[in-house]
Image (cartoon, coloured by chain):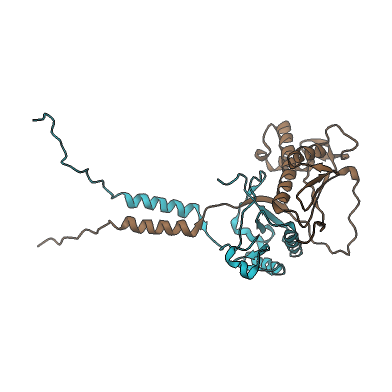
Chain colours: A cyan, B brown
Amino acid sequence: MSKFKQKTKGGSPKISTASLPDVIFMLLFFFMVTTVMRDVELKIKLKLPQDISESKKIEKKSLVSYIYVGEPKPQFQKIFGTEPRIQLNDAFAKLSDIQSFIEKERAARPESDIPFLTTSLKVDVNTKMGIITDIKQELRKANALKINYSGRTQPKM
Amino acid sequence: MAKREIPEINAGSMADIAFLLLIFFLVATTMDVDSGLQRRLPPWIDETTEKPPEIKKRNVFTVLINANNQLLVQNEWGDIRTLRKKAKEFIENPNDDPELPEKEMIEVPFFGTYPVSKQVISLQNDRGTKYEMYLKVQNELVAAYNELRNELAKKKFGKEYSKLEQKQQEAINQIYPQRISEAEPKNIGGKK
């Protein structure tokens, strides 16, 4: 005869899961607030330069248009080769498309915002400068002078 | 009258619905904020326009990058690690070295008449230079300016440059104007 009775008979008590939805909803709202919708599907390999100590955050994302440059991903290499290519929005583009792309970006925004438009160049680290120079010349012709060389301050973990 | 009982709604699947939504948002959104080196391109000029004014040799700090990503700084082999220091020395010219840029007395708010050097940094790269190297060099040059501005801000106002008011920042920018000129690239190291 034991002096101490076992209070629960086998098995552990059930944990209430009633607050689980609340927890998940909280996470959901956190992500909804802090993130932005993915806009383009990258068709190129893109490894941004790291350790660019003087890089600054772009404040107004709505005023930025992106130009991607890099080697096409393996599934596109059959058609587009392995030389670095330009990607505007969702498609590969030629150099001559840049000016009309800038025009379109301008037309999509109110006139008062046009002087503040920035073009962000997201370029893969292994790209040669030749193509970048050509892009810069096109941007100068289109009078889109504010540019941003995308890069990270700290190496990504 | 018999009381009509309201059946309780089972909330067990609520968590599943929330999970579904959560996963949707995790997949469809991105978190990263775009950051980078912000620069300004010179406006487009036709080749017919007259040549830019000559700049004295002592006022120009030349940085060349070749197709093998090697640096030539002021006609000497350079290293990316010492570039910032060299550029700072050139821009500031603390000892009024005749080899380094001239200075001009300019009226600057907060500072009075201040000797401002006529420095220009000229950057030229090859079409075969790697983008990473080019951006690193740009970064070092911008960093040189930023460090000098920061030092001056601390000396004069006792605060970091980024914490100054806009007018004070403008005054400092007048003393250390960022002049990085990019020449048309050469194509020596072969195609592309």
| Quadrant that contains the N terminus of chain B | bottom left
Measured from the top left, where is residue B22 in percent x and y? Answer: 41, 56
Measured from the top left, where is residue A112 in percent x and y? Answer: 66, 61
In this view, the residue in front, B180 or A61, is B180
The answer to whether residue A52 is above or below residue B186 is above
Residue B85, quarter of the rendered image: top right
Q: Residue at x 41, y 53 (%)?
A: A28
Residue A126, quarter of the rendered image: bottom right
The answer to whether residue A65 is above or below residue A151 is below
In this view, the residue in front, B41 or A155, is A155
Q: Residue at x 17, y 42 (%)?
A: A10
Measured from the top left, where is residue A55 in percent x and y? Answer: 65, 47
**Figure label count:** 0
In this view, the residue in front, B97 or B69, is B69
In this view, the residue in front, B51 or A110, is B51
Tell me: A59 left or right of B90: left
| Quadrant that contains the C terminus of chain B | bottom right
As drawn, the residue found furthest toward the left would be A1
Residue A8, quarter of the rendered image: top left
Q: Residue at x 57, y 47 (%)?
A: A156
